[in-house]
Amino acid sequence: ASVLLVGAYESSSLEDKMALLDVNVKGAACVCDVFGTKLAERRAHGKGAGLLLVSSLLGITGARGVALYAASKAFLTALAVCCFFVSFSSMTITAITINNNKQGGLWSEWQDKGIAVRACVLGPVDTPKLREQGVRPDAAPGIMSADEAAEKCLRTLAGVGPRHVIGWLPAVATVLVERLLPRSLGVAVISEN
């Protein structure tokens, strides 16, 4: 579940902003709280356990008109992992933590319990919410179907590292914003596209 507000920050009501935070931030924290113990119990019985936090490219890049949404998605990525370096594996960017995996986030906190925690960072996904905002799937480069996004995110649970940027567009945008361009220029490029 996710709430998306598009437009100037002041154009949304405080009620709508709180609804976005309730779902995107508080909802995720509640899920982690409720399922963290259950996942640890599952691991104690020798079963696999993983938590997937679905984030957004906008949580990395930001963009005009989606400030609160982008901040809520940045929260999800930070909840999974706080510090990372980027390595490349085909068209997926995988984050690798340093200092004996003690950087922070649930990925490192729950690692000793055997719980796989991943932040799956997606670009545009063809959802009813995105269509409500006037985005035409045929006009959005790199857009994925919801089924494709779900399949790729689930595959990250078997991967290495806590943050997985999925798809060619998010991979390129992440490198531009985090490594190649000054932050302000990277955000401007993303905002225009």
Image: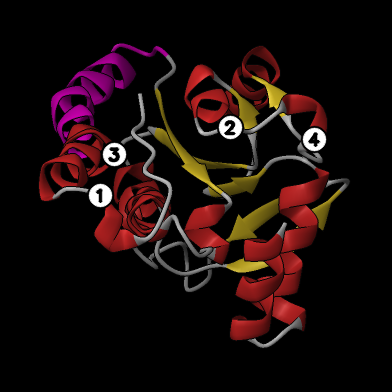
- The residue carrying mark 3 is 24
| Res. 118 in view | no
Earlier-in-chain disc, 3 versus 1: 1
Q: Residue at x 25, y 61 (%)?
A: 10
| Res. 155 in view | yes
- Name the image quarter holding residue 84: bottom right
- The residue type indicated by label 1 comes to Ser
Earlier-in-chain disc, 4 versus 1: 1
Q: Main secondary structure of the magenta part?
A: helix
**Label placed on residue 12:** 1
**Label placed on residue 139:** 4
* C-alpha separation, residue under disc 4 versus residue under disc 2: 10 Å
Number of other residues with Cα within 10 Å of mark 3, as a class: few under 14, some 14 to 19, many 20 or more: many
Earlier-in-chain disc, 3 versus 4: 3
Q: Position of residue 122 (x, y in %)?
A: 61, 40
Say left or right for 124 vs 127. right
Q: Quadrant of the N terminus?
A: top left
Q: Secondary structure at mark 2?
A: loop
* C-alpha separation, residue under disc 2 versus residue under disc 3: 21 Å
